[in-house]
Image: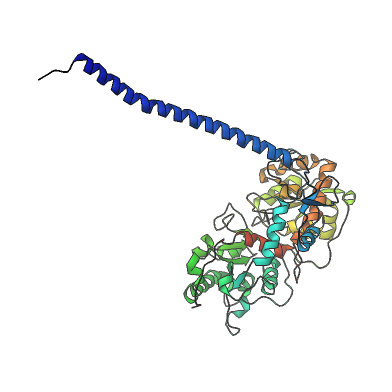
Amino acid sequence: MVRPSIFYYHSLRRSFRGFFFIPTTLALLTSLLILFYVYSTSNISTHHHHHHQHQSSLHFKSPSSFSTVSSSNPHLTLILPNNASDSNKSLTSQLGDDGRGPQSQRGLPPQFSSKGSGEFENNNDVYHDRDIFLEDYKEMNRSFKIYVYPHREDDPFANVLLPVESEPGGNYASESYFKKVLMKSHFITKDPVEADLFFLPFSIARLRHDRRVGVGGIKDFIRDYIQNIIHKYPYWNRTGGADHFYVACHSIGRSAMEKAPDVTFNAIQVVCSSSYFLTGYIAHKDTCLPQIWPRQGNPPNLISSKRKQLAFFAGGVNSPVRVKLLETWKNDSEIFVHHGRLKTPYADELLGSKFCLHVKGFEVNTARIGDSLYYGCVPVIIANYYDLPFADVLNWKSFSVIVTTLDIPLLKKILKGISSDEYLMLQSNVLKVRKHFQWHSPPHDFDAFYMVMYELWLRRSSVKNSFGEIL
């Protein structure tokens, strides 16, 4: 047998070297190309981001494509396309020129920095994005549909399912107002196939006063009602109740679902007691119903110079937070806190105070925010974990002061740290947003009813189910 020569071995080694050299070189080149691509695209993205931010900081208008709606504030402009519809312009005028138009507040520096320990921040924009809100609001009015589960007029519990005929009153009137206005609105459909959401029309306010049910029997009633809905109709089963909602203002509304866990975890809960710290309320799925005392007529306009008192609170001492507030400020000459019956009219105290304190009681919610806004008083919110009403739309820091319960001893320092100009801006924004915290029958554009409807519209499913025949 002929043995291979040494030349053969050298040739073989060179061929193996060449074999391994080629993929190694290709891998190196590929890595270099990837690094170059990442670097170049990063620069492009960064350049685009800075360019976008630069444009956002300017009131850029192209004469050929935009027209400007004049603003009451000379530094603010609303930019609309020339072909904007009359209805959109009408909505804009009703909302008021109190935003920056299509520019978003996100990513822009605030006009005022925080003062003391309070979360005071004001960029003079009461909406997170006013332009998007207007566009979505118009679409909601055009297309949003709700199916209400029907019942016979001779149903033994028709009184807790039918909307009230008289004008609702009291601290928990919001639930009744919403139901009464909804049932007469253009949002209602009798065709479940075109419905975006399904309304469970039981009234917690009516159930708690019904002698056959009472507070103790509400949980059983809700459980039985949901079971009836599940077995009688196909709609709940298609989504597990995710496209269903109910409305309740009294705090019993949340605990009423304890024997119907699918409602708590799947359905949309529109409740006044909207604390995302407690079990039973799921932020972003559920939403806050503002607790508003019903009032007739237009709200008063008292200029800030007539408000001599720094801050005001009156109410029952039914929580540790209120006890702490009373103990800290009960003898103060500038912050007036009171428990029990007032010697002066409640409205006069609200009208004479610069700031009005919303302090947590049994629940995070009270009617005091609505009271403050109605009387033009800047609300100071002292209630941790409060999912504030219409927080998806409104920039609360532009018209209120938010402090933690631990900062009650620093309250005067925080409020006095707000300059006169800052306060005037806060109070001016209060007057802009209070239209959203009023009930009307029939409803007015952008009032509490339409704002709750908008929150529901945001939570609707983007895909509708086809149900077939009603069972």
Count of numbered tags? 0
Residue 279: image location, x then y, percent: 54, 56
Direction from residue 167 to residue 23 in the image, left or right: left
Q: Which quarter of the rendering shows the N terminus?
A: top left
Residue 174: image location, x then y, percent: 69, 66
* Residue located farthest toward the left when viewing the structure as drawn: 1
Direction from residue 187 to residue 301 in the image, left or right: right
Q: How is the image coloured?
A: rainbow
Image height check: is 286 above or below 164? Answer: above
Residue 139: image location, x then y, percent: 67, 62
Image height check: is 44 above or below 286? Answer: above
Residue 223: image location, x then y, percent: 50, 70
Image height check: is 359 above or below 34? Answer: below
Residue at image coords 61%, 70%: 146
Direction from residue 470 to residue 113 in the image, left or right: right
- For the residue pair 421 and 346, the one nearer the viewer reads as 421
